Image (spheres, rainbow, N blue to C red):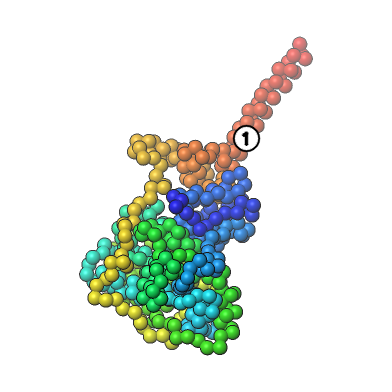
Amino acid sequence: MERFFHSVTLDSSKCMGCTNCIKRCPTEAIRVREGKACIISERCIDCGECIRVCPHHAKRAQYDPLSVIDGFAYKIALPAPTLYGQFNNLDDIDIVLTGLKRLGFDDVFEVSRAAELVSEATRRLMRDGRLRSPIISSACPAVVRLIRVRFPDLCDHVLPLASPMEYAARLAKDEAQKKTGLPREQIGAFFLTPCPAKVTDVRAPLTFERSEVDGAIAISEIFPKLTEKMEHLDKTEPLQNSGVIGVSWASSGGESAALLNDKYLAADGVENVIRVLEELEDDRIRELDFIELNACAGGCVGGVLSVENAYVAKARLQRLRRYLPVSRNHLPSEVPGELCWESELEYAPVLKLSDDMERALQMMSDIDRICEGFPGLDCGSCGAPSCRALAEDVVRGEAQESDCIFVLRERIRSMADALGAIGGHACGEEGRGKDK
């Protein structure tokens, strides 16, 4: 496996070097060099913000085509609850789930079922005092990767439980093995994803050796085909098996509300997430037990691989929940070991200046000195997201101070003044020569 897999990719032929993306990247992973954007692989967390803001569609997400299911004898769809919010006037989830079976899946296992189990496990761990407070949700892989590269002191605050997607795949395969008798390697579980970060989490998981999910198919990819199947159903199968708690995970605040605890905070949108993490890192948030963070505005319904407007989808889910029970899934007496992480979340020092402390301090001093020579406008014209980021690039040997147009302008002006002075001096000498 590659050291860094990324679902977010760049098509340089479409890039116009407009700098929209560099201003929105939460880890400053994008630069514009020689008129084209480039992504610093080790910094990228696949949040999809650059896809959202690129007016030229130069950024896109990799995901699996529907045909990926053909490589398995038994195929299971894992629909994210976000999927239900894409359809207008939906009052029966079984319509969606039956439509998925008509698309070629042998079975369907709702991710919202696993979400209810993760919620119950979280409640138990919090009640037993086995987690460091405040606990940060681990459901959004973009947030987990953001913490890993920018907020190392918060790594041990992250909830050490599998995401609903991952746990749903494990449970679905367990059920399928009992039902069919097939070996596990012939059973495929495929997540219908609203965001690219989930694709990355499938291909390169952080806290598991490998993912039980065998493919991630974009909701936007499957939506038109699924809609056609739903429109031509003669009857539905009774497949739906989750309640309000599970379906509510699709939008911001859903996971927190499921904890039945009012000492929580729910923030969505990557800029808001960063503000919360900064305050938490500075120890300015103490009174909370749980913090739910979603990189996408509105929660998972705001993912760039969804079809519907995030807030329209959220409103549809609110109406749909009126027809559902509170919860339909419960854990055994103990939290299953397979629900827990296999390894701890480790800090990835991709933003570190140097492993040598003395060298790092000198580089930091150089960055401060160079930054003082910049105007402090953070205009992005240099191809870096801020003046300080450019100064860092200069110190790393990846840019020049003259990449700043204001520095370049001053240097050109100084050169012009110097040439003018030389020219004036030469003219004076020539005039004195003629007088003689």
In the image, 18 versus 170, the foreground residue is 170
Q: Which residue is mark 1?
A: 412
The residue lying at 55 percent from left, 68 percent from top is: 66
**Image height check: is 389 above or below 213?**
above
User: Eyeballing the image, is 43 above or below 92?
Assistant: above
Is residue 19 found left or right of 281 in the rendered image?
Answer: right
Q: Residue furthest left?
A: 128
Instruction: Point out the residue furthest to the bottom here.
Output: 235
**What residue is shown at x 46% (from left), y 51% (from top)?**
2
Secondary structure beneath dot 1 equals helix
Please identify the quarter of the rendering in which residue 156 is found. bottom left
- Residue shown at 28% from the left, 70% from the top: 336
User: Observer-nearest residue: 102 or 72?
Assistant: 72
The location of residue 273, given as percent across then percent down, is: 42, 62
| Res. 371 visible in picture | no
Q: Position of residue 246 (x, y in %)?
A: 39, 77
